[in-house]
């Protein structure tokens, strides 16, 4: 097995695990809503009814998609 | 709203959420009720059936080999497959269950949305490309290229069939009751109708017909939720804040529904749900099987990406529907019976909000979409179960990878028929039972057995067949034991006062246990087979990233 191939695979594996780790960190941060550390998320934004918790939900959905987009772009570039 | 009603709603929704896990709302919160017969719903449903049967007839002409049967010949595009995956996943269950849970407890219901959505990025980052490059028809093809093919195929085929059967029981019981509720059909007739249509789709049209049924259904569901969300926002002056204000004014908990804590108060419970939802979904065999329907690894990654886009959009729309249901259903007497209970229970809140916004036409449309969704999900499950029997067990284990193609295709169709028959019989047998625990099993087993085996096969060079088998056994047995000792069986089914184990979804404990056992047994494995398993890793890695042409595939 060529060492360059293996090294390329390991590089891609590190990228995969990096993105997965970042994703899981963000994903499990949602639990903060049910802990005292997430109390600030209960506050409403200005005069609106939108709370930090609701904003966090929408933000996480969007950021997951952004993460996927970035991952897709990086992996496509590395394949070219 | 008493505490029991809230918890029944919670667990009902948890079960409803999983792709294919569908329990009728009425039976969950003790408020049986039935919608009046809606001619629009029946007309729309008949149109859907007629169109999908036409597609099945068209697909049957192309479904002449095992390959076209299992993976539609690998010719589905990434965007189409993404929509089909979304169609498989954004079930009526999600639509009804999450909206229902938000109707009960507001923000807390969103844990299910995020839990389910979180699986898709993981599928894309870790598995989409590698699984597509290594497999042919099922995820078991992937791991058997490295580990000892016969034992590992048997173990994983067993877990696949267990997951599929448990899903099907929950699905069929839920489908029967939901259809009874929405269309007024007798329970047994509903089961026969679902099973008959699914048999037609799968047995004749295989993966091609199943894919298009899922695509059409996803399109209809996305159209429906978009329409309701727009109507809700339009009625609130296109102000989300105004909609939320109406919801808090209508809910007994007031502004508390806009943040966490109305239903759940234990962060560990939240973690158990998150782990089960994420890793359970990633390991579902019928979801992984969809990765083989595209022509190459790039399209596989695009499939997962498009699926995320559609599913993410769907869950954000559900946020509007959930709070909209509180704003427009909670205070409207026409949706409550004489005893002041919501007609059909909280999981019918989604249908009621459709009625509030779009009258009979939108109600009929969404009811028909719910029925279509059940068909799409059962079709995916049936196909996955049939592939485990005919491809993984018959063709690969019994015939050592050299089956007679015609015999294999015939056996697949027989398997489809037998699974359909079993689904109807088990659906009738479990009609009056508390099946909540049965519906829990697939997600926990998938997270504790399928996911660890697939992950370690692809990402750890020290993994061995013995480690996989012992760890899978520990994962399976511990999952079943903790589910039995948990509230759903120990308290709800067996009638004890207090559960030995406090959580319904034990994957937070069983998945790490399974992984630890796999690692420990693999590390201490000094067998000759272990050497082969470890040696196979580098070849598998290169093939997984650069495609089968980089290194010829050899079964483990």
Image (cartoon, coloured by chain):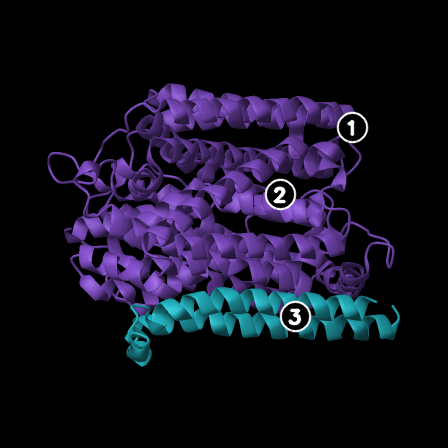
Chain colours: A cyan, B purple
Horizontally, is B464 left or right of B244 in the view? Answer: right
Q: Say if B319 sits above or below B94 in the image.
A: below
What chain is tagged by disc 2?
Answer: B
In the image, what residue occupies the spot 44% across and 20% down? Answer: B192
- Cα distance, mark 1 to mark 2? 21 Å
Whether label 3 touches label 2, CB < 8 Å: no
Which residue is disc 1 drawn over?
B405
In the image, what residue occupies the spot 72% across and 39% down? Answer: B396
* Circle 2 crowding by C-alpha within 10 Å: few under 14, some 14–19, many from 20: some
Q: Nearer the viewer, mark 3 or mark 1?
A: 3
Horizontally, is B349 left or right of B129 in the view? Answer: left
Instruction: Give the percent coordinates (x, y) of residue B61.
Output: 74, 23
Q: Nearer the viewer, mark 1 or mark 2?
A: 1
Q: Nearer the viewer, mark 3 or mark 2?
A: 3
Q: Foreground: B202 or B403?
A: B202
* Circle 1 crowding by C-alpha within 10 Å: few under 14, some 14–19, many from 20: some
Which residue is disc 3 drawn over?
A70
Whether label 1 touches label 2, CB < 8 Å: no
What chain is tagged by disc 1?
Answer: B
Q: Are marks 3 and 2 on the same chain?
A: no
Which residue is disc 2 drawn over?
B154
Horizontally, is A19 left or right of B40 in the view? Answer: right
């Amino acid at each position: 097995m060529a060492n360059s191939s293996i090294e390329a695979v390991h590089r891609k594996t590190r990228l995969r695990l990096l993105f997965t780790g970042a994703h899981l960190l963000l994903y499990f941060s949602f639990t903060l809503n049910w802990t005292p550390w997430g109390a600030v998320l209960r506050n409403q934004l200005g005069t609106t009814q939108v709370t930090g918790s609701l904003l966090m939900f929408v933000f996480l959905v969007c950021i997951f998609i952004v993460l996927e987009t970035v991952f897709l772009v990086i992996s496509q570039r590395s394949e070219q | 709203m008493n505490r029991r009603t809230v918890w029944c709603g919670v667990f009902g929704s948890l079960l409803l959420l999983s792709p294919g896990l569908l329990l009728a709302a009425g039976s969950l919160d003790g408020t049986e009720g039935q919608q009046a017969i809606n001619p629009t719903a029946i007309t729309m449903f008949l149109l859907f059936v007629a169109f999908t049967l036409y597609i099945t007839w068209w697909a049957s002409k192309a479904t002449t080999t095992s390959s076209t049967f299992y993976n539609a010949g690998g010719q589905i595009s990434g965007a189409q497959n993404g929509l089909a995956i979304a169609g498989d996943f954004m079930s009526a269950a999600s639509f009804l269950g999450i909206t229902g849970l938000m109707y009960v407890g507001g923000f807390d219901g969103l844990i299910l949305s995020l839990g389910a959505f979180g699986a898709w990025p993981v599928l894309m980052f870790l598995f989409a490309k590698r699984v597509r490059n290594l497999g042919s028809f099922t995820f078991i093809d992937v791991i058997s290229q490295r580990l000892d093919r016969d034992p590992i195929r048997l173990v994983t085929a067993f877990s696949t069939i267990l997951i599929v059967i448990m899903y099907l029981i929950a699905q069929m019981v839920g489908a029967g009751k939901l259809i009874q509720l929405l269309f007024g059909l007798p329970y047994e007739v509903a089961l026969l109708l679902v099973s008959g249509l699914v048999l037609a789709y799968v047995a004749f049209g295989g993966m091609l017909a199943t894919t298009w049924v899922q695509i059409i259904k996803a399109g209809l569901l996305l159209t429906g939720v978009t329409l309701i969300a727009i109507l809700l926002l339009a009625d609130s002056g296109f102000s989300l804040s105004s909609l939320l204000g109406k919801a808090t004014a209508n809910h007994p908990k007031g502004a508390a529904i806009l943040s966490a804590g109305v239903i759940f108060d234990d962060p560990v419970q939240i973690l158990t749900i998150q782990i089960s939802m994420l890793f359970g979904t990633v390991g579902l065999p019928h979801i992984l099987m969809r990765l083989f329907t595209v022509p190459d690894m790039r399209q596989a990654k695009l499939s997962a990406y498009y699926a995320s886009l559609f599913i993410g959009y769907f869950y954000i729309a559900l946020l509007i529907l959930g709070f909209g249901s509180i704003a427009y259903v909670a205070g409207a007497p026409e949706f409550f019976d004489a005893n002041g209970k919501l007609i059909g229970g909280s999981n019918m809140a989604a249908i009621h909000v459709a009625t509030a916004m779009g009258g009979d036409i939108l109600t009929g449309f969404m009811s028909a979409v719910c029925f279509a969704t059940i068909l799409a999900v059962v079709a995916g499950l049936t196909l996955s179960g049939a592939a485990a029997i005919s491809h993984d067990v018959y063709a690969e284990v019994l015939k050592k990878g050299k089956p007679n193609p015609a015999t294999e295709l015939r056996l697949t169709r027989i398997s489809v028929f037998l699974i359909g028959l079993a689904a109807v019989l088990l659906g009738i047998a479990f009609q009056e039972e508390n099946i909540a625990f049965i519906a829990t099993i697939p997600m926990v087993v998938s997270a504790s057995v399928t996911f660890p085996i697939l992950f370690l096969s692809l990402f750890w060079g020290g993994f061995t067949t013995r480690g996989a088998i012992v760890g899978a056994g520990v994962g399976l047995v511990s999952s079943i034991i903790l589910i039995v000792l948990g509230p759903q069986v120990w308290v709800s089914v067996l009638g004890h006062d207090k559960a030995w184990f406090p959580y319904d979804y034990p994957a937070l404990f069983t998945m790490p246990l399974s992984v630890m056992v796999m690692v420990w047994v693999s590390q201490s494995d000094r067998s000759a087979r272990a050497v082969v398993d470890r040696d196979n890793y580098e070849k598998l890695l290169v093939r997984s990233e650069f495609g089968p042409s980089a290194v010829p595939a050899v079964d483990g």
